[in-house]
Image (tube, coloured by chain):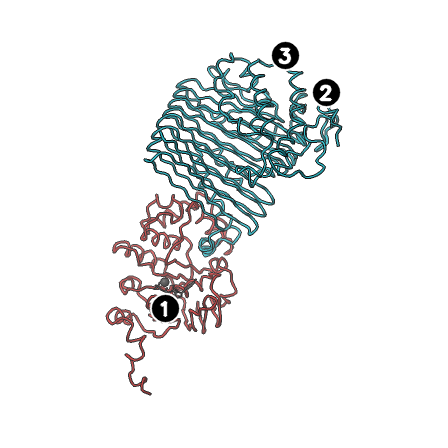
Chain colours: A red, B cyan
Amino acid sequence: MSLLVLDRLSAGIPGKPILKGINLRVNAGEVHAIMGPNGSGKSTLAQVLAGRPEYEITGGTARYDGKDLLAMSPEERAREGVFLAFQYPVELPGVNGPYFLKAALNAIRKHRGLEPLDAMDFLGFIQEKMKVLELDASLLNRSVNEGFSGGEKKRNEIFQMAVLEPKLAILDETDSGLDIDALKVVAAGVNQLRSPDQAQLVITHYQRLLNYLVPDYVHVLFDGRLVKSGGPELALELEERGYDWITKPAAVSPELVTA
Amino acid sequence: MIDPKNNPTLRDDKRCSKAPREAGASNRKPAANVGPTAPESTPVDGPIAGQSRGAPWLRYFEERERSQRATSPSWIQLLRKAGIAHFAKLGFPTTAEEDWRFTDVTPLSLHPWQPGSDLCSVLGGVDPEVAARVPRFRDCCELVFIDGRFVSALSSNHESPLALSVCNLTRGLASLPGAQFSHFGRVARYGVNGLAALNTAMFEDGAFIVVPAHYVVKQPIHVIFLTTAEADQSAFHPRNFIWVKAGGEVKVIEHYVSVGQTLHFTNAVTEMTIEEGARLEYCKIQDESPLAYHVALTECHQARGSRFVSHSVSRGAKLGRHELIASLDGENAECTFNGLFLGGDRQLVDHHTLIEHHSPRCASHEDYHGILDGQAQGVFNGKILVRKEAQKTDAKQSNRNLLLSENATIHSKPQLEIFADDVRCTHGATVGSLDKEALFYLRSRGLDLEAARRLLIRAFASQILNRISLAPVREALDGFV
Ligand SMILES: Nc1ncnc2c1ncn2[C@@H]1O[C@H](COP(=O)(O)OP(=O)(O)OP(=O)(O)O)[C@@H](O)[C@H]1O
Ligand SMILES: [Mg+2]
């Protein structure tokens, strides 16, 4: 069944349209990769799906798990199982990592009708996840993301994801900033979450990540529209040829120019 | 209005035969007012106005002098006289003075206060309900003052060698010869500060803490000034004295707190001397009634190699001001000023700090965070003075403010006066609201807007509170936010 259905979704900031009619259907169990040049709107799409209030929805619809996604607050979306791993995770000076994560987890558990975890159970639970992501315990005891290296921030995002166990995971350039070994560890963490009722939207610039997170579909986002879709082989082709052949109509079909 | 001829009246024992206690009722004659008798027209704000408003206090002082002459040591009488002389000259500060530009004490100076020393709320024993509300921190020992009066029954006993050196001021000053107190009355500069001068003339009781040389006081000393419902309309002048002798170490918490919503005036002065190589960690907590006025001066002299860490945390009073001064007199002395102030409604919260670098190779670190909501006004003024001799000074100052409402304001002013050439001085001030990105990040993890806001506000506060070394104090203050 379709977990996420976007129908002509358009959004932007006042005076600047960014997403110009996105159509996309993601079924449970699938991994979709979204690629595209800088500034094409990938992060905007990710943030719009997570409910960032600064973006204005100007048209279209988004249904998630049969519900109107756009009518939900960011926290409702999170509690319903949407998770965004940020391209630029926010530093939260003074916010205690375990405290924050426990509050988040228990808010989600409450929504799902589960008992809150107490401090002991929570610690046991996260220790397991930390092991999977080879997360250094000292990171957890610092303020969330404060002073973390680029790679540490990304690893921490996926650690949070592993703890919150979302149904729809949106990864915005999680690979950028990770070294080769870290990439493998993080990808293994993401793969561990895969299940028949879970789906992933993976935004990346590089085909390398897709060696580990093998996508069912690859889409190209350009100027606010999904202009091309294909299987994993599309990513390989993009790696080789870049985007020009898709994004410059002249290069694709010169005859159209004269028509 | 009160007839000035009746003013002031001192102790009247009849007032101490307690009438059945009523909330907020005060069991004394209204004749003991100190304060102008006729606030007829609003005076033009200027130094003259500030002086004339002091007149009732001068009259009250004379009366008191006459009745107390026999009881207090002559050197204290002289000090009080010097205090009142300065107060007569300086009067109440006015907004015409740069240091008081945003902090208007006109209402306070016009209010017909009754001397807190005339209160007898604790003479017949402390109400158990009040006793139960004395805030206590785990692992600390206490000096408890209720409505300005020392209550030994609620305070800790100190064993030798501290028996005579950690106690209430009245006892401390009486028990040792005056010559010992070369520091008492010499640290706080009451010659330039009218309210400190008034305190010097009128001070009642407070903490007396003298730490012997090379002695480390294990238990932090929690000095509590609690006002009860009886404190309504009263003025208090607490005076604290801290002297850490060479190599000694102590932690002191100076804590002002009210039970009930009383309109009272606290005018506190704390003097500190930290001798060579000695250490003092000091935490001042201002949590007075939302109707109260609280004005305090803390001044510290530091000798070579001494360390002074101050945490000033305020959230109470309608008008609250804390002036904190450290004078780095010897080489390699170091001071750290942390501050957290919270204001809401129409509160005015003012923190003035002054760090004077008089000697080479001293360091000062200052970091104040303000959180203001409603129509609150905050004032931060951080002055750093580096004298010509104070080469290799390292001074850092920062003031960050979080405004939670559009109507809250902050006046933040760093003031650097540097006369040495080989120094490192940095300062910065920021004003902002809650970070939208951070709020969204937290919400995207499932926290609702209110929880996310609270978490960020507490995080901002905790950046200051986390520096308090005493866990029980830190935990209690965490709940402030
Ligand atoms: N809040 C905003 N205010 C102003 N412009 C914005 C905002 N958000 C996005 N944009 C603009 O919209 C366009 C798309 O931005 P977006 O971040 O979605 O691109 P992207 O595809 O993620 O790029 P990259 O690959 O570099 O991460 C850019 O031109 C960006 O400057
Ligand atoms: Mg992006």
- Which residue was labeled with disc 2? B12
- Which residue was labeled with disc 3? B70
Q: Is mark 1 within 8 Å of ligand 1?
A: yes
Do the residues indicated by labels 3 and 1 lie within the same chain of the protein?
no
Residue at (47% x, 29% y) in the render: B282
Residue at (41% x, 36% y) in the render: B417
Vertical position of residue B98 compared to residue A69: above or below: above
Kind of residue sitting beneath label 3: Ala
Q: Chain of mark 1?
A: A
Is residue B458 toward the left or the right of residue A229 in the image? right
10 Å crowding of disc 2: few (<14), some (14-19), many (20+): few
Circle 1 SS class: loop
**Which mark sits nearer the N-terminus, 2 or 3?**
2
Kind of residue sitting beneath label 2: Asp
Closer to the camera, B214 or A198?
Answer: B214
Q: Quadrant of residue B231?
A: top right
- For the residues labelled 2 and 3, the Cα–Cα distance comes to 19 Å
- For the residues labelled 3 and 1, the Cα–Cα distance comes to 88 Å
Q: Quadrant of residue B92?
A: top right
In x, y percent, where is residue B182? 48, 17
Task: Count how many numbered circles sit on residues in the image.
Answer: 3
Is residue A237 toward the left or the right of residue B415 in the image? left
- Which residue was labeled with disc 1? A40
- For the residues labelled 1 and 2, the Cα–Cα distance comes to 83 Å
Q: Is mark 3 within 8 Å of ligand 1?
A: no
Q: Please, which residue is most extreme toward the left here?
A: A240
Res B154 visible: no
Q: Chain of mark 3?
A: B
Closer to the camera, B255 or B59?
Answer: B59
In x, y percent, where is residue A98? 42, 46
Are the two marked residues, 3 and 1, in contact with CB atoms closer than 8 angstroms?
no
Kind of residue sitting beneath label 1: Ser
